[in-house]
Image: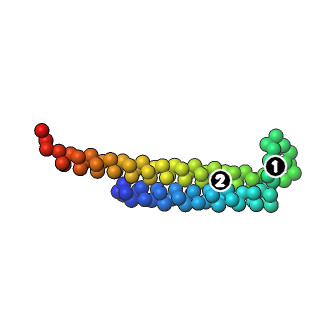
Amino acid sequence: MSGATLAKSAMRFGTRFGIAAVVLLVLGPFINRNFGIGDGLNYLHLPALWEEAPVAVLVSLIYLLLLVTSMLLSAMLITTSLVIRHSEASGQATMNKDSTSTGF
């Protein structure tokens, strides 16, 4: 697989993970209020909430895990794509400079 193809693929997947993170961020209050433990999350009372509503705690924790994972993967893949593209561009510039030099 060439560098350009790899960079394009990484950018595509990074963008998709970024869109998923934005959707999760927008839907977060709705998910937490209706299915999770609510907006006023106090982590000191998490064991007590686990006793009363374990499914709500799991929904909130899975939501947070998905949000953080999609944001990190998006940032990592987009950064990787940009680094690959920069590396290829600087490599081509170096080859162009070497071919135009007169060889003194």
Q: Which residue: 81% across, 53% down?
A: 38
**Residue type highlighted by circle 1:** Gly
Quadrant of the image occupied by residue 33? bottom right
Would residue 55 be seen by someone viewing this image from the given angle?
A: no
What element does badge 2 sit on?
helix
Q: What is the x, y in percent for residue 104? A: 12, 38
Horizontal side of residue 5 vs 49, given as left or right:
left
Q: Residue 74, image x and y in percent? A: 55, 53
Q: Residue at x 29, y 50 (%)?
A: 92
Task: Name which residue lies at 42% across and 55% down.
Answer: 7
Is residue 23 found left or right of 41 in the rendered image?
left
- Quarter that holds the N terminus: bottom left
Q: Which residue is mark 1?
A: 40
Q: Point out which mark residue 67 bears.
A: 2
* 4 lies left or right of 103: right
Query: Which percent across, then down, holds residue 82?
Result: 44, 51
Q: Quick one: which residue is furthest to the top in this view?
A: 104
Q: Amino acid at mark 2?
A: Leu
Is residue 72 found left or right of 78 in the rendered image? right
> Disc 1 to disc 2, how far (Cα)?
18 Å
Please tell me how many numbered marks the rendered image carries: 2
Residue located 67% across and 51% down the image: 65
Question: Is 79 above or below relative to 13?
Answer: above
Query: Which label belongs to residue 53?
Result: none
Residue 25 appears in the figure: yes
Dot in front, 1 or 2? 1
